[in-house]
Amino acid sequence: MHILTKILVVFAAVLSLGLAALTSSYAMNRDTITSSFNDMKAQRDKANSLYETQSSQFAEEKATLNSQIQTLQNELSQAQNANRDVESQLAELRLEARTASDRADSVTRQIADLGKTVDTQSKLITSMSEEQRKLREDAQRARERLIASLDRVNDLESQNEVLTQANRALQQSVVELQDIANNGGTATADAGTVGEPRTISGNLISGRVREVRSDNGQQYAEVDLGTRDRLRKNTKLHITRNGEFVANLIIVRTDLQTSVGRVDTIGDDTVQVRPGDVVLSSLTR
C-alpha cells in the first residue's frame, strides 16, 4: 500500500473517531440544547411583547405629553393676551386718572363759581316750580279730555256692534227671502219647526267639513257654509269623500259663513266624518 494511502486511511480513522465523539456528545446534549433553544425563543417572544407594550405606552405617553404641551402653549398664549389686555387697561386707567384729576380741578373752579350763582338758581327754582304747577294743571285737563274721548270711543264701538248685529240679521233675512223666492214663493220649515229635513233647490252648493266633534256619542260637524249659502236649521246636506257618499248632515245651527250640523250615518255607527270631507246640497247634480 502506498504511503499516502496509509496516511489518508489514518486521517479517515481519526476523523471517524472525532465524528463518533461529536455524535455521542450531541446525542447526550441534544435535549439540553433544544430546551435552551426553546427558552431563548420564549425569552425572545416575551421581549418582543414587552417591547410592543412599552412602545404602545410610550406612544400614549408621548401623545399625552404633546397634548399637555399644546394645552400649556394655549394657556401661555392666553396669559400673554391677558397680560396685553391688562397693560392696555392699565394705560386706560392712567389716562382716566389724569382726566379725573383735570376734572377735579375744573370742579373746584366751578364750585367757586357756584357760590356766585346761588341766588340766580333760587330764582330759577321758583320759576320752575310755577311752571311745573301749570304743567300739572294742563296734564290734568288733558287726562280729563282723554277720559271723555275714551268714553266716546266706547259708545261708538257699542253702537257699531249693535249696527253690525242688525246688519247680520238683515243679511240673514235677505237670504231667507231669497230662499223663499227660489222655492216658489212658499216658506219652508222655520228655524224652530220640527219635521222632515228640508233640501235646497236650485244651483248645487258645495263646501267642506272644517271640524268634527262628538257629544254623547253623536257626531257633529262644522262646515264652511252659512245663511249666505241659503242654509237654515233643519236643512239636509250630504257628506262625501273621494266621490263616495259618507253620511247626511242635518243643520242645527247656522251663522252667516259657517254652520253646525248633526251627522246622520243612516244606522251605520262605524262611519266617521273627517275634516276636509266634501259637503254637497244634492248628490244628483
Image: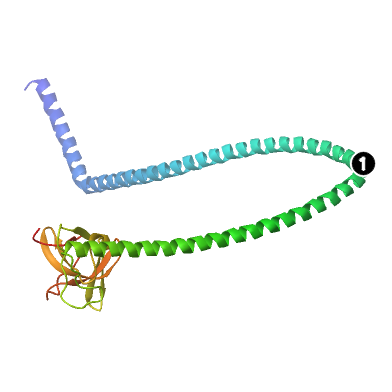
Q: Which residue is depicted at the point 43% across and 65% down?
A: 162
Visible in this render: residue 170?
A: yes
For disc 1, the marked residue is 112
> Could you tell me which quadrant the N terminus lies in?
top left
Q: Is residue 8 above or below residue 17?
A: above
Q: Position of residue 110 (x, y in %)?
A: 88, 40
Residue 68 appears left or right of 82: left
Element under disc 1: helix
Residues 165 and 180: in front is 180
Q: Nearer the viewer, residue 166 or 140?
A: 166
Q: Where 97 sits versus 43, above or below?
A: above
What is the three-letter code of the residue carrying label 1? Ala
Residue 210 location (% of width, % of height): 26, 62
Q: Is residue 77 left or right of residue 157?
A: right
Q: Residues within 10 Å of mark 1 (few under 14, many from 20)?
A: few
Task: Please indicate, yes or no, whether residue 210 appears anywhere in the rendered image.
Answer: no
Q: Horizontal and vertical percent for residue 3?
A: 11, 21
